[in-house]
Amino acid sequence: MKKRTMMGRLVLLALFAATHAEGADKQPEYQQQPLMLNAADFVPAKLLKGAGYSVDGQAKNDGLVNVYSVTGADGTAAVESTQALLIYISEHEALKEIEEIAKTDVYKEAFKNAALGPYNTAKGLVTEPVDTVKKIGSGVGKWFSDMGSSVTSKDPNQAGLAKTALGQAAAKREFACRLEVNPYSPNKTLQGKLDDLAWVAFAGGLTVSAAFSAIPNTAGTVVGMSGTSNSMKEMVRDKSPAELNKINKKALSDMGATPQMADELLNNYVFDPYEKTLMIGALESMRGVKNRSVFIWNAFGVDDPSVAVFVRLQAECMAAYAAKHKDMAAMVDVCGKTFLKGKDNSLVGIFPLDYVAWTQRLDEKERMFSGAIEKINNGKGKKLIVYGKIDPIARKMLESRGWSVVEEKPVGAS
């Protein structure tokens, strides 16, 4: 009996070893970074070169996010993520339009009026915005890998008292909305041009409609994802940061956030008023989804502007998905990232990543996610939705581990 038992154990061990070896053979080698990808596969070719900038035809990918090399007036810079590149392009198009406005007779007349008007002295007393320019680095990749977190403490986005009292700040927001750019953008050049334009508008009597009717009609580059974006952008246009703060705080409270949680997010000024309002608006639109405070909690530690944009976009993608799939019941935390949970207990992870490749980082992260998901829903299903592209090798590996993998159309100009 002992011999048979021992023989049986040896057979089982041999079978396990053979199966394990066979599985090891199927495990592909990790894809080495950076991957070199065609920029035109992610951004319309017509946008890769414009007034004052050109984008290199090859983009470097770290397994999740593309890094584009962009040459402009200030030299060559690395722009992380397709979304950030579209914002960069939008801002350059806006600068081009402002230059065209400055050449018109209607602007020149308003400029004279502003110089002669009673506000020209006050302009010198206006405190310029705090320089919030941040170097674009690998913030999204770090965030996805759970590396580092901190929260800033001072709001750099509030306009000076003189600007607010005189109405220049409101004019600036109105022009930014018409140009389809963030009025609180960290782009220092854009901020300066918007400030000058808004001052001439307010002090010289230049209206937004008159300014744009004097130049050829041009369409901006739209980078929003969900249906909430337009209404939220209009709110950013019409409300001061202080007013937005009150509106956003109430929205967070209505979603179940405690006053402390709301203050924690609202006081994280890496999210400027624009990004904060669009993100909260997207979350607010998911009224049938419970536990949205999970998303708020996971946004606390964001300390990089590029990640703030990513998280806002993720909220918009989740809102777009939930609007189409009414069976999404709640949000849950999976290893520090927010997933949607269906009524059937399946979990859905939604990420606006550019290009997902099979790397050691993804392998390790997937194992963490799968282990946590198994404890949450006992194998009731897991889906990964990427608003971007998934490499065939990565797709095969993820599907072999039980994931339903879906590619949505990458964010692009419309």
Image: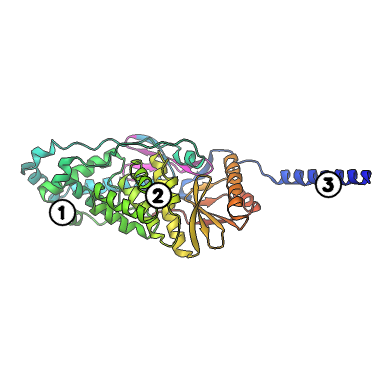
- Residue 402 percent coordinates (x, y): 63, 54
Q: In front here: 206 or 237? A: 237
Where does label 1 land, which residue?
207
The reply to whether dot 3 and dot 2 touch (C-beta < 8 Å) is no
The mark total stands at 3
Left or right, 392 with reference to 160? right
Q: Is residue 94 visible?
A: yes
Q: CA distance from mark 1 to mark 2?
A: 31 Å
Q: Main secondary structure of the magenta part?
A: strand
Where does label 2 land, which residue?
312
Q: CA distance from mark 3 to mark 1?
A: 82 Å
In the rendered image, the quadrant that contains the C terminus is bottom left
Earlier residue among tags 1 and 2: 1
Left or right, 124 with reference to 57? left
Residue 120, image quadrant: top left
| Residue range corresponding to the magenta coloring | 50-74
Dot 2: element: helix
Where does label 3 land, which residue?
12
Q: Amino acid at mark 2?
A: Arg
Residue 63, image quadrant: top right
Q: In front here: 58 or 60? A: 60
- Residue 118 percent coordinates (x, y): 5, 43
- Residue 343 percent coordinates (x, y): 53, 63
Left or right, 171 with reference to 244? left
Dot 3: element: helix
Q: Amino acid at mark 3?
A: Leu
Earlier residue among tags 3 and 1: 3
Residue appearing at x 38%, y 41% in the figure: 305
Q: CA distance from mark 3 to mark 2?
A: 51 Å
Earlier residue among tags 3 and 2: 3
